[in-house]
Amino acid sequence: MREKTVYLSLGSNVGDREANLRVAIGELPHAGVAVTRVSLFYETEPVDLREQAWFLNCAVEVETHFEAIMLLRALREIEAKMGSRKLMAKGPRLIDMDIRLGNHRHAGIESAASENASAAVCVGTAGRNCTGSGAPEAEKDCEAVA
C-alpha cells in the first residue's frame, strides 16, 4: 500500500497537558503511523462547554498506509491506552486526537485548524512550521520530528 500524508490535531486540557501531547505523539509510531513533523503547541479556549480548562493543542503531520477509518481506530486506541474518556461532547479530555486533513494537495500550504478557528497551525512545504496563536508556547522554536 502507498503511504499517505495526513494531518492530525491533538488536544489536552486535563493534567499535564504538554506531557499528554508528547506521550500521544510518541505512541503514533507504535500504531503504524510515522510522525514527520509536529507544530508548535498552542492554547485554545474550550468550545461550547466553556466551564473547563483551556486546551493545549498541536498539529502533527504523519505518513501512514491506513485508510481513514483504520487510522481513526488507531487514534482511539491510543486515547484509550492513555486513559482518556469522552464522558460528554466538547468536555474535558486527557487527550483528543482527530484527523484534520488527508493527502489533498502536493504543494503550497496545508492548514490543520482546531475547532477554534482563530488558532490555525500551518505546515508549509518549505520544511518549517508556523503558528499565529499568540500563546506563550508559540514563542518556542518549531519542532522537527524524524
Image: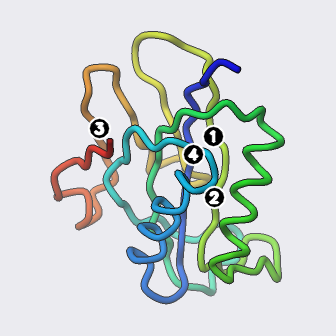
Work out how far the residue at label 3 is from the one at label 2, CA to CA, in angstroms. 19 Å
Q: Say if mark 4 contacts mark 1, CB within 8 Å.
A: yes
- Name the image quarter holding residue 67: top right
Q: Considering the numbered disc 3 on the image, is that residue within a helix, a strand or a loop? A: strand
- According to the picture, the residue beneath numbered tag 1 turns out to be 100
- According to the picture, the residue beneath numbered tag 2 turns out to be 97
Q: Determine whether, in the image, residue 33 is placed left or right of residue 56.
A: right
How many C-alpha atoms fall within 10 Å of the one at disc 2: few (<14), some, or many (≥20)? Answer: many
Tell me the residue at 32%/46% (across/down): 145
Q: Is residue 34 above or below residue 77?
A: above
- According to the picture, the residue beneath numbered tag 3 turns out to be 129
Q: Is residue 77 above or below residue 127?
A: below
How many C-alpha atoms fall within 10 Å of the one at disc 3: few (<14), some, or many (≥20)? Answer: some
- The amino acid beneath tag 3 is Asn
- According to the picture, the residue beneath numbered tag 4 turns out to be 8
Task: Please state which of residues 49 and 3 is positioned toward the viewer in this rendering.
Answer: 3
- Residue 49 x, y percent position in the rendering: 70, 77
- The amino acid beneath tag 4 is Leu
